[in-house]
Amino acid sequence: MDTESTYSGYSYYSGRSRGSHRHGERSRDRHKSRSKDSRSEKSVTINTPPAEPLLGDSSVRGEPVQDDNWGETTTAVTGTSEHSLSQEDIVRITKDLEDSVGLNCRRYLTRTLAVILGILVLLTPLAFLVLPHLLWPDKLQPCGTACEGLYISVAFKLLILLLAVWGLFFRPPRASLPRVFAFRALLSVLVLLFVISYWLFYAVRILEVKDADYQGIVQYAVSLVDALLFIHYLAVVLLELRQLQPCFSVCVTRSTDGETRHYNLGQLSIQRAAQAIIEHYYSDFPVHNPALLSASKSRAAKHLAGLKVYNVDGEFPAASAEGPGPGNNAAAGLAHSQSRAMIAAAARRRDTGHNELYYEEAEHERRVRKRKARLVVAVEEAFTHIKRMQEEEQKKSPGDVMDPREAAQAIFPSMARALQKYLRTTKQQHCHSMESIQQHLAFCITNNMTPKAFLESYLTPGPTLQYSRDRWLARHWTLISEASVTSGLRDGSVFLLKCVDFSLVIAAKRIPFVQMSEEYIDPKSHKFVLRLQSETSV
């Protein structure tokens, strides 16, 4: 049982000539179904970047060639599945490119409008101070020390406002939301109306009459800067502080395997709650493994494929296309009897299916434990062949010194086969490439980590972010909600986050209001008596 493996196309065609014709036909059908499954699986993830090269391509990079079985473990990366595209794939790729171009244009347009509004806000107080000196400098009344103090106040307030706006509004975006953020749009409109109203008042009361009181003009500019600082404080409250207090408990369930997590969120809109859930998903949920989901489907297909119906009374004539006749009626009766026999046999097998499932899972656990033990022993033996050298030892024998990368490449062949078989048994071969394993091994050697620390990444499935970006990063998430995505979360809100392979089902529940009361207990009331009975030993 331990020597069983999933053969690739190359190993299949090399061994087919040694089998009989009937065995070759069955193997060919099995291989076609496997390639079809891998092709459909690749077409689902066609939007992601191509996977990293496996061990079979190491000779191109000049690295030592390892066991060829490593390349056979990842059957999804074959010539057929990697280069076969259907018409639906082409249409989906075109649509994704158009959507990405539209999202980029909208993101840059929003950033451009924000920069223009920020420049207008920062230059308006300076324009209020400069325009009187340019238009009617002879009529201005000198204000002396008072104006100089106000100059310093305006300068420092504008510097604080510039830093505050940069820290709050010009952070790198973490996601591209489908709708405009309502509070941010409201604040932008408020600032624009506020600046326009100040300009209108400045044009009517100062520019038209050419006011000579320059100290009053400077105080007018200072009042504008103070108002802008208060608006920024309002932005901090609405955008950052309002969502800190938890108000809802959301249950996030992955649709394929039922993996569930619970999170507490504050007062957020549906689209911002979806963004927070996606960020939590990449760091909390284990990586999505489609290979583990195909066990039940393959088990049902195996049960149906194992059923055969034999005709012991003789062969009925084939149905002709010229119309009804005795031959056609006999063939129809045979087909009907065969279908009834198949249904009855499937029902009988379904009654005993739990026993088969139990023994299959027990056998799978036994194989996993056995190959895990082999892997642990192989890794521990491989780590015994390397030793960290001290500085004085490096001066004595400089020719035998290796860097961490070379040391990892030297000891990797001794553990490659055991690791490959374990990853194949646990259906993790598509999550780890040869290059990523060697990089992790070099990292462990550099930081003087133990074999157990090296194996932890493969024995225990980690969160999604720990794997290669080419394998977990989804380019596009679709938010599906009956309510408007700009509306806030409510008790009982349900929405979906859908990507190419699965979807996340989110259900929100409001955290209940807790009413507490106080009860005072006098410390002197703690008095006790001893109750003696005839059976006690006291």
Image: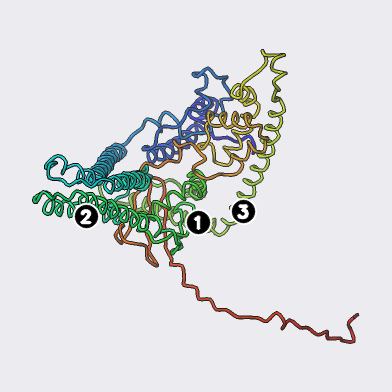
Residue shown at the point (60%, 30%) measured from the top left: 441
Is residue 367 visible to us here?
yes
- Indicate the position of residue 536 as horizontal and vertical percent values: 88, 82
Point out the residue furthest to the left here. Answer: 208
- Alpha carbon distance from label 1 to label 3: 28 Å
What is the three-letter code of the residue carrying label 3?
Tyr
Assign a secondary structure to mark 2.
helix
- Indicate the position of residue 344 as horizontal and vertical percent values: 49, 58
Assign a secondary structure to mark 1.
strand
Please tell me which residue lies in front, 177 or 456: 177
- Tell me: 273 left or right of 260: left
Whether 146 is drawn above or below 490: the answer is above
Badge 1 or badge 2: first in the primary sequence: 2
Q: Please tell me how crowded label 3 is: few (under 14), some (14-19), or many (20+) other residues with Cα within 10 Å.
A: few
Mark 1 vs mark 3: give the one in front. Answer: 1
**Which mark identifies residue 261?**
1
**Which mark identifies residue 358?**
3
- Alpha carbon distance from label 1 to label 2: 45 Å
The residue wearing badge 2 is 194
**Which mark identifies residue 473?**
none
- Tell me: 134 left or right of 475: left
What is the three-letter code of the residue carrying label 2?
Phe
Contact, mark 2 vs mark 3 (Cβ under 8 Å): no
Badge 2 or badge 3: first in the primary sequence: 2
